[in-house]
Structures are given as structure tokens and as C-alpha cells.
Image (cartoon, grey):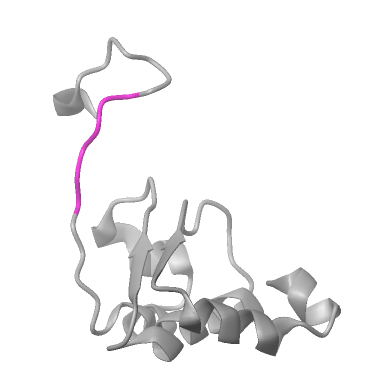
Amino acid sequence: MAVAHGAGRYTKLLAQWARTDVLVLDDLAMAPMSDQARRDLLEIPDDRHGSRSTIVSSQIPVDNWHEALGDPTLADAILTGSSTMSTAWPSMVNPCVSAEMV
């Protein structure tokens, strides 16, 4: 999204994503997020709420998303109205690790 900001395509990108039936955001908050990145992230569910589906995945447990996003107020706003589901999957890196061990 930072590249879209710099290239003047941010508004067009959000509009495109708002029309996408199912949007997948993979690996949420795997690296620290800047204030601008958090505000950008807030725009996505805000634009799509009630009209399109958004799937968010992260290796971070849902209970830790507030801390991972770095701003509890924005995290509340991003997660408000969302349904969350936490699952434990077997490790793809080490197939010998069972889901119960993760």
C-alpha cells in the first residue's frame, strides 16, 4: 500500500479491493506496522463492511492481534464487526510437529 501511496494509486487500489468479492489478507502483522500502515489497514474492512467478505490470516493468535497491531484503538476499529476463528494447523516446515504441539 505504501507503493500505491507513492505512485498516486492508493484511492484506485482501495476502490478495486472494495469491489473484490473475497479479499484475502495473508500474514497480518508479521512485521511491526507504521501508523500509516495501520490507518491503511483500517480502510479495508471499513470500505467492505456489510458488502464483501474479507479473510485475514496470521500466525499470531487472535488474542494477540491488539498488541501485534501496535495501537489498541485502531485494532478495536479494525476488528469491530469481524468474526474471528483461531485454528492450530500442523507445521508445514516440520511435518513431524502435530497440531496439538503448535
Q: Relative to the observer, which residue lies in front, 43 or 50? A: 50
In this rendering, the answer to whether 90 lies above or below 32 is above
- Magenta part, dominant SS: loop
The location of residue 69, given as percent across then percent down, is 46, 68
- Taking the view exactly as shown, the residue that stands out farthest to the top is 96
Q: Relative to the observer, which residue lies in front, 74 or 25? A: 25
Give the residue displayed 51% in from the left and 51% down from the top. Answer: 30
State the quadrant of the N terminus.
Answer: bottom right
Give the residue displayed 38% in from the left and 78% down from the top. Answer: 75
In this rendering, the answer to whether 38 lies above or below 88 is below
The location of residue 11, given as percent across then percent down, is 67, 89
Quarter holding residue 22 = bottom left
Q: Is residue 88 magenta?
A: yes
Quarter holding residue 82 = bottom left
The location of residue 9, given as percent across then percent down, is 76, 82
Q: Which residues are magenta?
A: 86-91
Q: Relative to the observer, which residue lies in front, 59 or 71? A: 59
Left or right of residue 72: residue 3 = right
Left or right of residue 40: residue 70 = left
Q: Is residue 38 magenta?
A: no
State the quadrant of the C terminus.
Answer: top left
Quarter holding residue 38 = bottom right
Left or right of residue 19: residue 22 = left
- Taking the view exactly as shown, the residue that stands out farthest to the right is 7
Give the residue displayed 21% in from the left and 38% down from the top. Answer: 88
The location of residue 64, given as percent across then percent down, is 31, 59
In this rendering, the answer to whether 17 lies above or below 89 is below
